[in-house]
Amino acid sequence: MAAFCRTLQKHSFGLKNLTQNQMWPLPLNECIRYKFTKSRIPDEVFQPRPSDDEKYGGDPQQPHKLHLVTRIRSGIGRPYWEKKILLDLGLEKAHQTVVHKNIPAINEKLKVIKHLVRIQPLKLPHGLPTEEEMSDTYLRSTGELIIRRCIYPLENKSIES
């Protein structure tokens, strides 16, 4: 920056003479330096928005416990550390979905490969399934774990008339 200002002052002979004679003060350094040092990004960009929580289906006070991670892009041509993270998380094939815990160690790995995967919260609209219901569950593409309720017949009671 300083070299730029010196070059500008060296090649502007008329302005240099005017500033030395103090006939016309030229605050050249301040205006250029101000232009490059002041942040031009508005402060609203860095403030959290309540619409983000609705958009991504999360509550910042009660975060979800499980991530649903789906690989959406290939690891070909990516650095070796990204390929290693994909293998560590169990995402070997394209469009493969894996469930992981929402813990800092996993979140750090997901942050590195966030451009290769889709991360969704695992939603449990019917609550956690019991061991008997595990065989009757399926996972929707929206990240909901659905339990098919089996209807069992009641005991036959004789109807007296």
Image (cartoon, grey):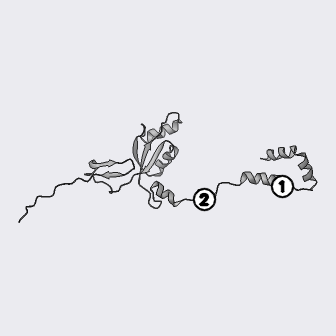
Q: Is residue 1 left or right of residue 40?
A: right
Q: Are marks 1 and 2 in contact (CB under 8 Å)?
A: no
> In the image, what residue occupies the spot 52% across and 35% down?
80
Label whose residue precedes the other's in the sequence (1 or 2):
1
Estimate the x, y position of residue 90 in percent, counting from the top left: 41, 40
Amino acid type assigned to the residue bearing label 1 in the image: Pro
Estimate the x, y position of residue 24 in percent, counting from the top left: 90, 56
**Residue highlighted by disc 2:** 44
- As rendered, which of 79 and 47 lies closer to the eye? 47
How packed is label 2: few (under 14 Cα within 10 Å), some, or many (20 or more)? few
- As rendered, which of 136 and 88 lies closer to the eye? 136
Spatial CA span between label 1 and label 2: 31 Å
| Residue furthest out toward the left | 161
> In the image, what residue occupies the spot 89% across and 49% down?
15
| Residue 27's disc number | 1
- What kind of element bears circle 1? loop
